[in-house]
Amino acid sequence: MAKNFEAEILSNEEVAEKIFRLTLAAPELAEISRAGQFVQVKISDEFTLRRPLGIASTAGGRVKIFYRLVGRGTENLSKKKSGERLNILGALGNGFSPCNRKILLVGGGMGLAPLLCAAENYSADVLIGGRTSDEVIFWQEEFRPHVEKIFITTDDGSYAKKGFAIDLLPEVLSAENYSAIFTCGPEIMMRGIAKLAKEKNLPCEVSFEKRMACGLGACLSCSIDTARGRKKVCKDGPIFDAKEVFDYESDNPEN
Ligand SMILES: Cc1cc2nc3c(=O)[nH]c(=O)nc-3n(C[C@H](O)[C@H](O)[C@H](O)COP(=O)(O)OP(=O)(O)OC[C@H]3O[C@@H](n4cnc5c(N)ncnc54)[C@H](O)[C@@H]3O)c2cc1C
C-alpha cells in the first residue's frame, strides 16, 4: 500500500558526472519497500508531475536513490540540501520475486539502482555495465559489501573489460550456476540478456522504465503490450517476467 512521506534529506551528493546519490531518513518507507519498487518524488510546487525514481537501498531506515541529471526535474532535485524535506509517494510497483538461491544481477547505467536493493536482500553476483570508468567505479563501491563477485564492462574500455555487459555475460554464466537473472537498463541490453537467459533455461526478470504520470495505475500513460494483454508499468510492473514482454514481441513482429 503506497503512502505519502515527508522525508528529511540526509545528503544529496554528486557521485559521478551528473549522477547523484540522495539519502533520505524514511524508516517507515524503508520497512515497507521491496527490491525493484520505486517512489514518486514531488520535486516542488512548480512541477505538476512527480518524478519516478527507483529505490536503491533501504538499509538502516534510510532510503537511497540514485538519479541522473537529465532535465528540469532532476536539475531542481540536485539543488536540494540536507535538512530539507521531500514529499515522496511509495513504495510503488511490484518488486522482484523472492529468491533464496544465488542470482545474477545485470545492470546498465542508472538501471543499477534497483539492482542494488536486490543485492542487499538476496544472495547475488553483479555484472555492471557503463559508458566510462566514472560511471562504474561508484557502483562497484556501492555493490561491494553486498555481493560475492563483481564483473564490470565499460563501452570505452577506460575501466575493466571493454565492451557491453551482454558481451561478458556468456563467460559469467558458464562459470557459475545461477538460479535466475534480474536485469535493468537500456531495453536493447535487457532484450539481449533475456534471449541468452532463455537459451540457458534461466528465469529472467526485467525492470521496465516508461514515462509515467500518476504512478498509481490510474492514468494508463505507461501501458505496454505483453503476452498477458495490456499492462501498466507502474502497477503491474516495473518488474516483468522477460518471457512475458520480449517473447511476445518477437512472436509479433509488428509490435
Ligand atoms: C519506474 C521508474 C524508475 C526510475 N528510476 C530511476 C532511477 O533510479 N534513477 C534515474 O536516474 N532515473 C530513473 N527513472 C527515470 C526518471 O524518472 C527520469 O529520468 C526523470 O523523471 C526525468 O525527469 P526530468 O524532469 O529531469 O526530465 P524531463 O525534463 O522530464 O525529461 C528530460 C529527458 O529525459 C527523458 N526521460 C524522462 N523520463 C524518462 C523515463 N521514465 N524513461 C526514459 N527517459 C525519460 C525525456 O524523454 C527527456 O529526453 C525511472 C523511471 C521510471 C519509470
Image (tube, helix red, strand yellow):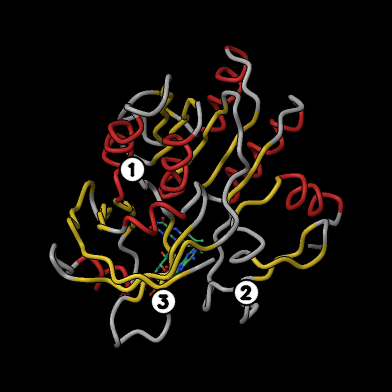
Identify which residue is drawn at 42% across, 30% down. 153
Q: Residues within 10 Å of mark 2 (few under 14, many from 20)?
A: some
- Image x and y of residue 47, in percent: 35, 84
Element at badge 2? Answer: loop
Residue at (58%, 12%) from the top-left corner?
A: 175
Q: Which residue is mark 3?
A: 50
Say whether residue 139 is left or right of residue 189.
left
What residue is pinned by disc 2? 217
Report the Cα–Cα distance between label 3 and label 1: 24 Å
Q: Nearer the viewer, mark 1 or mark 2?
A: 1
Mark toward the start of the polypeptide (3 vs 1): 3
What type is the residue that disc 1 sits on? Ala
Secondary structure under badge 1?
Answer: helix
Q: Return the x and y of residue 244 as percentages of the image width and height.
A: 77, 50
Q: CA distance from mark 1 to mark 2?
A: 28 Å
Q: Up-down: is 87 above or below 121?
A: below
| Camera-side residue of 80 and 1 | 1
| Amino acid type, mark 3 | Arg
